[in-house]
Image: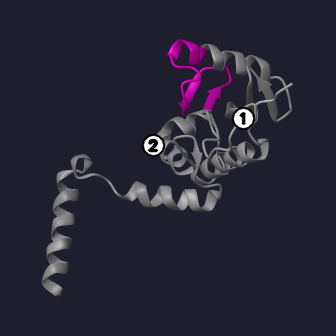
Amino acid sequence: MSEEKEEPSLYTVKAILILDNDGDRLFAKYYDDTYPSVKEQKAFEKNIFNKTHRTDSEIALLEGLTVVYKSSIDLYFYVIGSSYENELMLMAVLNCLFDSLSQMLRKNVEKRALLENMEGLFLAVDEIVDGGVILESDPQQVVHRVALRGEDVPLTEQTVSQVLQSAKEQIKWSLLR
């Protein structure tokens, strides 16, 4: 009996999902080709939701994957890794995401508030996980970085008055030197 051992890898997270009360996708980010088409992804999400939305546990093994999850009011948060992945690492990602959103939404983690703050969600997920590699697990750091990136609006998305104000400030500082 030869048991194949997987090589240790930094690529720990396969997907991060946020579903609503009906199991519909609000946010999904897949980091590998386990479910290449949107149809397969939606079927997987429905399966996960049907298996987890009535239970109080925090972890499930489903379709050869480790799923850690948490619910809040009308949202279900999922972090998915392979079956041999460390559940504590996946749980750290889940807790970091949930706590970051909780701070950003002022403890009002529910569907309407999340939909109004999708940009913050995207930035937070990008700060926590990049390409399946866990970058950060401290919610304070994530919230701080999201706030910094939120202030950095690209020139193409600024209003004319914002561009003029920015130009005035730059000219003022260059003259004061």
Numbered disc 1: secondary structure: loop
Q: Amino acid at mark 2?
A: Glu
Tell me the mark number nearer the camera, choosing from 2 and 1.
2
Vertical order, 67 against 158 (above or below):
above
Q: Residues within 10 Å of mark 2 (few under 14, many from 20)?
A: few
Q: Nearer the viewer, residue 64 or 18?
A: 64
27 part of magenta stretch:
yes
Quadrant, the C terminus: bottom left
Tag 1: amino acid? Ile
Mark 1: few/some/many CA within 10 Å (<14, 14-19, 20+)? few
Q: For residue 84, what is the image quadrant?
A: top right
- Residue at the spot of label 2: 119
Query: In the rendered structure, which segment of residues is drawn in magenta?
Result: 17-42
Picture mark count: 2
Q: Is residue 111 rendered to the left or right of residue 70?
A: left
Badge 2 element: helix
Residue 79 placement: quadrant? top right
Queried whether the magenta region covers residue 32, the answer comes back as: yes
Q: Position of residue 74 (x, y in %)?
A: 68, 30
Left or right: where 5 falls relative to 45: right
For residue 148, which numbered disc appears in the image? none
Q: Which comes sooner in the sequence, label 2 or label 1?
A: 1
Residue 73 numbered mark, or none: 1
